[in-house]
Image: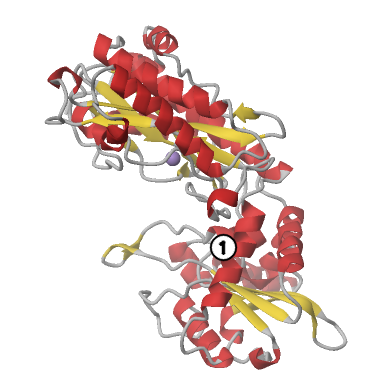
Amino acid sequence: MKRLLLPFLFLLSVFQIHAQENLPADYLSKEFHKGRREAFRALMPANSVALVFSYPERVFSKDINYNFHQNPDLYYLTGYKEPDAVLLIFKEAQGSGETYNEVLFVREKNAAREMWTGRRLGVDGTKSQLGIATAYNGNAFKDFDIDFKKFDKIIYDKIPTDIGSDKSESDLSGLLQNFKTKAGITKEDESSLELFRTITSTLREIKTPEELVLMRKTVKLSCMAHNEVMKAVGPDMSENEADGIHAYIHRKYGAEGEGYPPIVGAGANGCILHYGENNSTKIDNQLLLMDVGSEYHGYSADVTRTIPANGKFTAEQKAIYQLVYDAQEAVFAICKEGTPLLELNNKAKEVLANGLLKLGIIKDLKEVSLYYPHSCSHFLGLDVHDKGNFKGPQSLLKENMIITVEPGIYISANSKCDKKWWNIGVRIEDDILIKKDSCENLSVDSPRKWDEIEALARQKSTFNEMKFPKI
Ligand SMILES: [Mn+2]
């Protein structure tokens, strides 16, 4: 018997993809996700059900997809990181006998597929690692015994219409189609979408202690990356190389990648708000604007620093830089619980307008939007532009919100001012934790004052010593 069993076991092991070892030890805990589902349920109306689908996979090149990025709402509620999934949360317990109040449908284990496209948690892993007691394979959703008509409210997010299908019941397209059929949805119900947005925004705009640990980490390591580039940068460096140093430092400290496409623009490129080509081969003696933040276990930093490539600000660059700095300081001073969100941008705009007038760059305060066309703040968290309730003037800052404060001035060539100001683009962006009577700058580890930046730029970076063969 033993002799027969051994080859059999060996065969089994060939087709088994083993669980991964040496994973980070600081992922959000299953207790965190359970707590978030309970908080979600508490905000649901009586006799309701909510559905949260995974994000679609997207094509990068023919038969190759982009690295999958989970829907932050589903990640927040479950920790599940794979595509083709749907979570159901019920307000009240369902079923008779063994009841349940949540169900997660996941990708089925498949050794052959896992050898090609990576490990799958499967039903058992979902139960043991994510602590979700009721989990099924996606193909069971079609016949899952649920009468959607008995609920007073079905809560769901916008249903994507531009996704591919593998013609199975269990991919995202199949799950969505079966949901629409089972629930008799022919057109999205606006009030359902609104309710979904309100609940997820209400939860996600306030960070829990576990989230704050990860937010502090992602922001701190992004600061380390900015500092290293400040030391390493020189006129001969390309934008893309500076971008690459950020990416390397992020990964060195354990981040999965970046929370958004990095903006690394020199001179004129720094005046383009969402510049993303990062392909200028030389920074030259220009200002380099870097809006780069890591993503660490799902949480995004959003930090911008603007530095002189040769290590010294010119008089004009310094004047603009100081003005943006002053605007940021003025906003920090009112960042605390109870301040209306709209006040932040009003304050930034007021300081910038007065400063530009004083420098003779504008003739009328209203012209400030020529050079400061965006707004000052947004929520920050799992999404770089995170969810949060914004309902006009009555929306106030609350304790444990995290927002950005990011005033900027962008004077592109041919602007109607003295040409000595042209191609100066400055943004300074910090990540701010709101407290009861004040705020805490989480990105304090990267210098913001012009003289501190110049001092750091005089230091040598490890990257300056690295020599690679010429090709
Ligand atoms: Mn931002």
Side of 329 where 338 appears, left or right: right
Q: What residue appears at the point 73 percent right and 53 percent down from the top-left corner?
A: 32
Could you tell me if residue 366 is visible in this image? yes
Way the structure is coloured: secondary structure
- Seen in the picture, residue 355 relative to 216 is either above or below; the reply is above
Q: Quadrant of the N terminus?
A: bottom right
Q: Residue at x 58, y 25 (%)?
A: 333
Say whether residue 209 is left or right of residue 243: right
SS at mark 1 in the image:
loop
The residue that appears at 51% across and 77% down in the rendered structure is 190
Task: Answer few, some or many: residues within 10 Å of disc 1's Cα (few below 14, many 20 plus, some between 14 and 19).
Answer: some
The percent coordinates of residue 403 (x first, y second) are: 55, 40
Q: How many marks?
A: 1
Q: Amino acid at mark 1?
A: Ile
Camera-nearest residue between 374 and 433 = 374
* Beta carbon of the mark 1 residue lies under 8 A of ligand 1: no
Residue linked to disc 1: 17
User: Can residue 302 be seen at all in this image of the molecule?
Assistant: no
Quadrant of ligand 1: it is top left
Across and down, in percent, residue 153 comes to 66, 82
Q: Quadrant of residue 217?
A: top right
Residue 402 lies left or right of residue 92; in this view the side is left
- 105 shown above or below 389: below
Outermost front residue? 364
Could you tell whether 413 is left or right of 25 in the image? left
Judge whether 316 appears above or below 97 on screen: above
**Quarter location, residue 74:** bottom right
Question: Which corner quadrant holds the C terminus?
Answer: top left
Q: Residue 463 location in percent, x, y? A: 36, 19
Residue at (41, 66) in percent of width and height: 57
Report x, y in % for residue 13: 60, 65
Determine which quarter of the picture holds residue 356.
top left
